[in-house]
Image (cartoon, rainbow, N blue to C red):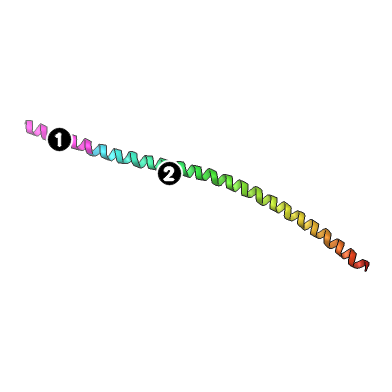
Amino acid sequence: MEDRISELMNLVVDGQKQMNEKLDKMDSKISSTQEKVAYLVEFTDEMKDFKAKTIDELREIKDKLFSIELITASNWKDVVRLRSVK
């Protein structure tokens, strides 16, 4: 009877060891996943900032191009006037 109890106790201890090993692996995977999520959140924030800056720069370029178009149109108007004076 004592042998059987000892055998069962050993099985329980072995089961606990296996369970602890599995829990340790899960903790490691959770930590790794948390690090990856933190990196992705940081990367996402950086991309949002990059997008906002890019949009602002594109707006500035668009405004400058519009100004260039207006100036060019005015210059063509002057060129036409000068040609008509000849």
Circles 2 and 1, Cβ within 8 Å, touching? The answer is: no
> Is 73 situated left or right of 4 in this image?
right
Q: Is residue 12 magenta?
A: yes
Q: Residues within 10 Å of mark 1 (few under 14, many from 20)?
A: few
| Residue type of the residue flagged with mark 1 | Asn
Which residue is denoted by mark 1 in the rendering? 10
Residue placed at 54% from the left, 44% from the top?
46
Quadrant of the rendering where the C terminus is positioned: bottom right
Q: Main secondary structure of the magenta part?
A: helix
Residue 82 x, y percent position in the rendering: 90, 65
- Would you say 51 lies left or right of 77 here? left
In this rendered view, identify the residue nearer to me: 51 or 75. 75
Residue drawn at (83%, 62%) of the image = 76
Residue beneath the point at 72% across and 51% down: 63
Question: Eyeballing the image, is 39 above or below 65?
Answer: above
Instruction: Please tell me whether mark 2 sits on a helix, a strand or a loop.
Output: helix
The residue identified by callout 2 is 36
Numbered range of the magenta stretch: 1-17
Between marks 2 and 1, how big is the CA–CA gap?
A: 39 Å
Q: Residue 75: image x %, image y %?
A: 83, 60
| Of labels 2 and 1, the one closer to you | 2
- Vertically, is 58 above or below 33? below
Q: Position of residue 62 (x, y in %)?
A: 70, 53
Q: Tag count in the figure?
A: 2
Of all residues, the one furthest to the right in this rendering is: 85
Residue 49 vertical position relative to residue 72 in the rendered view, above or below: above
Amino acid found under the numbered disc labelled 2: Lys
